[in-house]
């Protein structure tokens, strides 16, 4: 009697616990099913990220109750399969939708959506406007660069013209300035005049001619001076007092020798002398 009385309460408690577990499983499976359906709907609606977020609690719950609810693993696996399949279906749907709207790919459709356009024509017009704007900017920049280049070239040409005019004025002034000519052409004029002076003296000497020692040797100069008067622009007249002509009695008479040198043509124009 006592055994029946003791087993009765224990049996009731055991049945109550079993009922509680069953109710808990039913409620938990219902919640899992609801979340799974919402997740699948999210995937099929092209909201794959949202679907994954909603499906995550299923995996967490399965991990938490892994010792008590082995069925969770099966449920989670089914949901995962549905998500993967849903992703493929969603991708295909997106591609077909993109083609139907005139886009070449779903990526282009997404780019258009990010820009605020839902159809190909509007998006192409938007891209054309952007391209036109960029081209206008590039053309304006190129035109500005060309203008700067022309302005720079004009400024350089003007500078060169002014420099040429200045050089021309300076040259004109120098060609009429014996001192300036001598400072620039003294050595070359003296050398070239000296190299042809002997021939000239031979042509005018009745007997013989001679040079002073200052005009001889490696460092001697036959034409050390110049006339300060310019009788022709650019022509420098070199002067020498070192030449002598022999007379009929054997004596030498000093003469003044002149050599006209054209500094621009770089040649000796001729010699003259005076006694």
Image: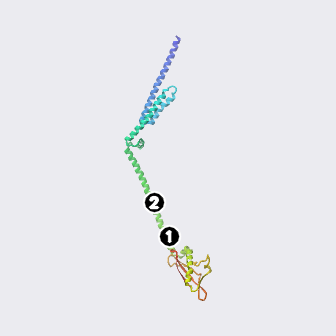
- Mark 2 vs 1, N-terminal side: 2
Q: Circle 1 sits on which residue?
A: 167
- The number of callouts visible is 2
| Colouring | rainbow
Of residues 247 and 137, which is closer to you in this image? 247
Choose top left, top right, bottom left or bottom right for residue 123: top left
Q: Residue at x 46, y 29 (%)?
A: 32
Instruction: For mark 2, give the secondary structure.
Output: helix
Mark 2 closeness class: few <14, some 14–19, many ≥20 residues within 10 Å? few
Instruction: For mark 1, give the secondary structure.
Output: helix
Please say if 26 is above or below 205. Answer: above
Please say if 185 is above or below 130. Answer: below
Horizontal side, residue 90 vs residue 268: left or right: left
Residue 213, label in figure: none
Of residues 84 and 169, which is closer to you in this image? 84
The image shows residue 98 at horizontal and vertical percentages of 39, 41
Using the numbered discs, state the Cα–Cα distance from disc 2 to disc 1 in whole angstroms.
26 Å
The image shows residue 259 at horizontal and vertical percentages of 54, 79
Q: Residue at x 46, y 26 (%)?
A: 27
Please say if 89 is above or below 126. Answer: above
Residue 149, label in figure: 2
Mark 1 closeness class: few <14, some 14–19, many ≥20 residues within 10 Å? few
Q: Residue at x 49, y 71 (%)?
A: 169
């Amino acid at each position: 009697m006592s055994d029946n009385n003791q087993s009765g309460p224990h049996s009731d408690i055991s049945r109550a616990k079993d009922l509680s577990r069953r109710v808990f499983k039913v409620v938990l499976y219902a919640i899992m099913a609801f979340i799974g359906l919402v997740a699948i709907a999210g995937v099929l609606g092209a909201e794959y990220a949202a679907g994954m977020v909603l499906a995550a609690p299923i995996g967490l719950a399965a991990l938490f109750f892994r010792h008590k609810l082995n069925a969770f693993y099966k449920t989670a696996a089914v949901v995962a399969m549905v998500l993967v399949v849903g992703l493929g279906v969603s991708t295909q749907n997106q591609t077909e939708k993109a083609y139907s709207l005139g886009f070449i790919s779903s990526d282009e459709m997404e780019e258009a959506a990010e820009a605020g356009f839902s159809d190909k024509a509007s998006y192409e017009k938007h891209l054309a406007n952007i391209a036109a704007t960029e081209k206008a900017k590039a053309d304006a920049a190129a035109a500005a660069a060309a203008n700067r280049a022309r302005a720079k070239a004009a400024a350089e040409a003007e500078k060169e013209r002014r420099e040429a005019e200045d050089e021309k004025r300076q040259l004109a002034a120098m060609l009429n300035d014996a001192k300036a000519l001598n400072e620039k052409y003294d050595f070359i004029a003296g050398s070239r005049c000296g190299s042809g002076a002997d021939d000239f003296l031979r042509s005018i000497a009745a007997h013989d001619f001679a040079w002073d020692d200052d005009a001889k040797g490696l460092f001697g100069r036959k034409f050390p001076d110049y006339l300060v008067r310019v009788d022709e622009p650019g022509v420098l007249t070199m002067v020498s007092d070192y030449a002598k002509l022999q007379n009929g009695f054997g004596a030498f008479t000093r003469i003044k020798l002149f050599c006209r040198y054209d500094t621009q043509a770089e040649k000796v124009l001729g010699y003259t002398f005076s006694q």
